[in-house]
Each structure stands twice: as C-alpha cells, then as structure tokens.
Image (tube, coloured by chain):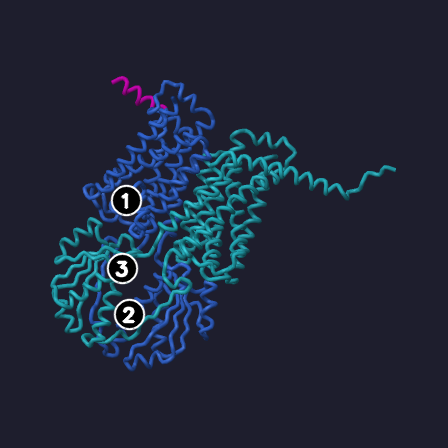
Chain colours: A cyan, B blue
Amino acid sequence: MSIPKPAGPAPSNAWALKARRLRALVMKEMRQILRDPSSIAIGVVLPLMLILLFGYGLSLDVKNVPIALVVENPTPEALELAGGFELSPYFRPVILRSTAPAQQLLLEHRVDGIVTIPQDFSRRFTLGNAQVQLIVHGGDANRARITQGYVQGVIGLWSARAAAEGRASPMQPVGVEARLWFNEANDSSYFLVPGLVVLVMTLIGGLLTAMVMAREWERGTFEALLVTPVRSEEILLGKTLPNFALALVGFALCVVSAKFLFHVPLRGSIWVLLGASMLYVLIALGIGLSISSWVKSQLVASQLTMLATFLPAFMLSGFLFDLRSMPTVVRWITYALPARYYVALLQSVFLAGDVWSVIVPNTLALVAMTAALTLGSRAAMRKQLA
Amino acid sequence: MSRIATTLRRILALTRKELLAVLKDPRSRMSLLIPPIVQALIFGYAATYDLNHVAYAALDRDHTAASRQLLAGLDGSGIFERVADLERASDVQSIINSRRAILVVQIDPLFERHLLAGQGAQVQLIADGRNSTTAGTAMSYFSSIVDRFNSRWGADHGIAPPAVELLARAWYNPNLETRWFMIPGMIGTLTLLQTLMLTAMSVAREREQGTFDQLLVTPFRPYEIMAGKAAPSMVVGTIQACGVLVVAQLWFKIPFVGSYVTLFTGLLLFLLAAIGIGLLLSSVAATMQQAMLYSMLIMMPFSLLSGLTTPISSMPAAVRYLTIINPLSYAIDITRRVYLEGTGLGLLTADLWPLALLAVITLSAASWIFNHRIQ
C-alpha cells in the first residue's frame, strides 16, 4: 500500500530547496563583495564622502558678493549710502572714485557688479528723484538676479531710514511681507541635502549592480551558473539582496549626516522615509541589473549606467531646477524618472512632515516602477537563456 | 629622425586599433556619439533657474478694485498662474503642503482703504521653501510686479515716486537667462564624463582580459602605449565638444562672440588634463569595476563642484581649494567667457596654465606608474 504521497509536502520541499539555492547564491555574492573592496567602497565610503563634500560644498546662498562701489562725489548722503553697502553681509565692496577702473575689475571677473552713486546724487535726492546705477555681470543669471535684489534692499533700507527722519518721501504704496515656509532661515542646504541623498542613492544603487551581470558574461562564468539548477529569478534575487543591504547602509549614513552634520530637520516620520528609500534602492539596483544584463559588456554598461542615473537625477529630478518651468516634452521625460518621485518625497518628509497628499501618489509611482522593473528584468533574463 | 617616425607610426597604429575597438560595436558607438547631443538638448531646456510657470493661490480678503488690480497684474504677467482662489486662511496650509501652489498671496481686508488713505498697505506672501531657490526667484518676480503696481498707483493718485531709483543693467546676458550661462558650461561637463571614463576603462579592460600583457611584449614603449590610449579619447572628446557647441548655437541660438581658436586651445588643454586623470586612474585600477568606481569618485565631485550649477564663490574655503585641481572648473570658466564675452587668450592665462600644469602632472605620473608596474 505504498501510495506516493500527494502534492502536500512536495511544495514545502521545493521551497526549502529554493531557499537553500538562494542562500548559496547570496553567500557567493557576499563573498565576492567582501573580496573586492571596491563594492564596500561604493556602499559605505562613497555615500559618506559625497554627502560630506557636497553638503558642505554646494550652496546657492549668495553672500559676500564682491562689488565695485563708485562714489563719484563723496557728499554726506552718498557716503551714508555707501556705508550701507559696507555694513551689509551680502556685499564686499571696493570703493572707487571713477567708473573706468571699476569696469576693468568687472572685465577681469574680480567683481560681480558695479554700483555707481553718481555726481548729482545728493542734489537730486533733495529734489526726490535720485538714481543709483547698477551693472551686474549677467553671466550667472541667477546670481545676478539675487545681487540685484540685495542692492535694491540696501537702497530701500537706507531710503526708509531717510524717510523716517523726514528727509525723503514716505514709503511705497504696497509693501511685500514675505515668509518662506519650511525653510525659515532661507538656507539652501535645507533643500540641497535631501536632494543629494537622492543623487547618492541613485549612483550607488546603479554602480553596485551595473557590472555584476556583465562581468559574469564577460568572464564566461554565466554559462557555468546556467548549468546549475538555479533559476533565473534566483540569480537575480541572489545578486540583488546583498547589494540591497549594502545600499541601505549607505542610506543610513546619508540620513545620519543630513540630520546631525547639516542640521536639516527631519519633520516627517522615519518609517515613511525608510519605506520610500527601500523602494527607491530596489529601483536603482534594478536599473543597474537591467542595463548590465542587456549589454553584456562592462565598458558599455558603465557608460550607460552613468548616463541613465547620475546626470538625469542631477538635472531632471527637481533637485535643483524647477520641474514646472520645463517645456512639456522635457517634463514628460521626467515622469519616467524614478528620481523625480523620490526627490518630492524626501523634500517633503524632511522639511514639511508627513504630507500624505505628496507621499501617497509618489510612493505609488515608485511601487509601479519597482513592479515594472522586476517583471522586465525577469523577462529579459528568460529571453537570454532561451 | 627615423625613430620619431617609428614612434609616430606605432602610436597611429595603436590609435587605429583603439578607435576600432571602441567604434566597431554599434552599442558602444552610439553610447559615445549620441548622448552628448541628446543631453545638451534635454538639459539645455531643463537646467535653468528661470521660472516661466509659477502656480500661485490667491487669498483675497479685501475684494476691492485695488486688490483685484494687483492680482490682475500677476495673472497678466504670463508667468504666474492662479490655481485657486482661497476663502479661508486655513486653506493656505493644505495648498502649499500638497505642492499645488508654491506661492500664496494674501491680501488683508482694508487693503484698499489703507492705500487710499496713503498709509501704505501690506501684501503677505507665503512661499514653499522646500526648494528655496525656486521660491526666492518666484518672490523676486512677485516683488517686481508689485513695483509696477506701485508706480502705476502712484502716478494715478499723485504719490511721489521713491526718492532713490535703481537703474540696473546686466552685461553679457541682458535678459538674465540662465540658459546662456548653463549651456556653454555644459561643453566641458558633458565631454569630461565620457572621455575620462573611456580612457580609464580601456586600459582596465585590457588588464582584465589579459591583452595588456600581449601589448607589453610588442616592441612598443610604455609611453607609446599611453599615447595610443590617449589619442582616441582625444578624438571622441573633441567630437563631443563640437556636438554640444553646435547644439548651443544652432538650436538654442546663443550668440558665440569669441574666437574658436581660443576656445579650442582651452578645450584641448582641458581634454589632455581629463585624459591624464583617466590614465592615472587606470594605472591604479586592477579591474573594470574598480576603474569605473574610481572615475565616478572623481567625476561626481568634479562636475558638481565645478561652478556649473552652484557658484564657486559660495563654497566654503576648504572646498574652494579642491576646485584648484578640478580641470572642469577652469574649462567652464574658459568656455563661458570665450563664448559669451569674447575674452581673448591674454585674460585667460589664469585658467590656461593650471590646465596645462594638470595635464603635464597627470600624464607624467601615469607614465611613471605604468613603467614601474611593468618592471
């Protein structure tokens, strides 16, 4: 009466086998990682180095702008206004008596602008229509615009004081009282550092896996893997898991330095941050894996990974440049980039808190991308094996 | 004399072989020629701090002719788009939080009455600081619209204009378009990324595949091998730079006012320095993965801290010292000044000699390491 056992235990056996095969694969990958220090460097040293370097180095704040201040006639009013520029933390003026040397300084890029307080400034000020001239170096348009605003500010402050002392006409009909939410100190590192975390995670995710498949193809070890009983998805999973763990270590380092070194507030919940980041790391790893199993050459894989990850995450993610001001076609491209959603998530979770109307749609987009990548890379593997 | 001829012949032969190795594979060919042009096009549009679309919400609690006139000034600007009319102050939070609007303009009751009484009125502006640069730009656009409103209101109601007026002009970029500044800077940036990596990887590949030893047993001298590896990258880099230059002029129509001789003098020195760095990296990397890692490690700081997107003068002193060894920061300065200002070689010496020095140092260091590794 030896009836062969029905399907009952068989699957559990298959599962156990599967788990064992997977463990073996993960072990193999881990050994490979541990033996080549470059992977550890990518996972741990690279993120730390990048976040430190860029966190300190990148800043869009404009301070200590070198300007040439031409006081053509040192009357009390002109000198008082010039004093306003000297006291302002935004300017580092060089005081001159005529325009010619100032223009030379501008040509040589020693100053960013020329402020001229003309000969007849005091006389026209008593008449109520004085003028101050500003020439800015327009090359860096953003900086030029900010500089112009600061010059306006210094003049406004000085005329307000003159008005208060009854020496000038009173203030403007409408004044603007501006408040900057989430970033009261107007410190550009508040939004740059969360963006940098995205950049770093994109890069290390892609770098960790970009070469692994291509390397097996190039060295011919892929065929050796194929004759073993492991399945294609197990190979993929075995390559993903150790690198996933490594990338999360990098992520933790980034968040800790954002919070404790750069003092960027973390106003949302750490779990939302972690969940979104795990999804994003999976996507970044998946992009590297797909490229590397598609091109089968380490040289081309490395070029493509760099093109597909670093620069788009830098330019098209909303990390620096406003997405809504891009032309429609370019904006469509940004919808295809996972970095876009992750930047929106991180900027909100760090600076604004758990804003569900931002978190839910962006997380859903990331989930959809993870699913698409998983299915895509499995299909790609199957096809290559066939 | 014949020795020089042999050397040249050998270098040419190696260059040909390298170019063939790079260009015969269609994927690799595409990955070298197409991306810089596509990137210049896409990033040319994307990389701008200028705003042409600012979504704002209005919270008008005055509902008078004056408040409507102010808001009409915004709507008529072509930049501001009103996405909502809010009723209550409590709505401000959700519209900013959800990123539907980046500005909320709040006009208090009695706005018009204060204006008519000559007391001066205030408008409150709330901006989303999650990207404080965008917010700052939007706020400055808003201020200029308020200025326009003020001068019209003043003219209509006989109020004296401000006692001191600022006349501002921007040289070299009269409309203050960021694009004029970004795209010339990209000539160097887009070229650097691929030439550096191509150089670093091509040696590492020979190492990994074992063909480097075969090269060594040929009668080639180490410096000839190096020159043979450098020349193809030089060719690729020059072609890429030309591609970006063409996009800048023909597509984005940014006027080129300088001299091509000056520009390419700078670019060739820059490419030499970049290739020197690539060779230096490849001489220390054992595998392609390492070569890629090292080039990434070098390239990210070089491109982010080059002055392309954030000004070098805003960096802290310690980081600014690092830009001294960054060839890209010199290249960007050269391309921008030659391109937009027509600066001549004389004023550029401060950029040119560091590039030349970097090229000499990296190339000789690389050849020294090559020699020592071989022995």
Q: Position of residue A64 (x, y in %)?
A: 26, 56
Q: Which quadrant of the view contains residue B294?
A: top left
Q: Is residue B208 left or right of residue B176?
A: right
Identity, as a three-letter code, of the amino acid under mark 3:
Tyr
Q: Position of residue A228 (x, y in %)?
A: 64, 32
Q: Secondary structure at mark 2?
A: helix
Instruction: State how many labels appear.
Output: 3
* Chain at tag 2: B
Residue wearing tag 3: A90
Q: Secondary structure at mark 3?
A: loop
Identity, as a three-letter code, of the amino acid under mark 2:
Arg
Residue wearing tag 2: B148
* Chain at tag 1: B
Which stretch is magenta? B1-13
Same chain assignment for discs 1 and 3:
no
Residue wearing tag 1: B335
A242 w.r.t. A111: above or below: above
Where the N terminus of chain A falls, by quadrant? Answer: top right
Residue B248 visible in the displayed image: no
Q: Main SS of the magenta segment?
A: helix
Q: Position of residue B122 (x, y in %)?
A: 33, 74
Q: Is residue B49 left or right of residue A21?
A: left
User: Residue B364 or B150: which is nearer the viewer?
Assistant: B364
**What residue is rendered at 34% in x and 77% in y?**
B66
Identity, as a three-letter code, of the amino acid under mark 1:
Thr
Labels 2 & 3 near each other (Cβ < 8 A): no
Q: Earlier in the sequence, mark 2 or mark 1?
A: 2
Q: Is residue B294 left or right of residue A131?
A: right
Judged by depth in the image, the label closer to the viewer, 2 or 3, is: 3
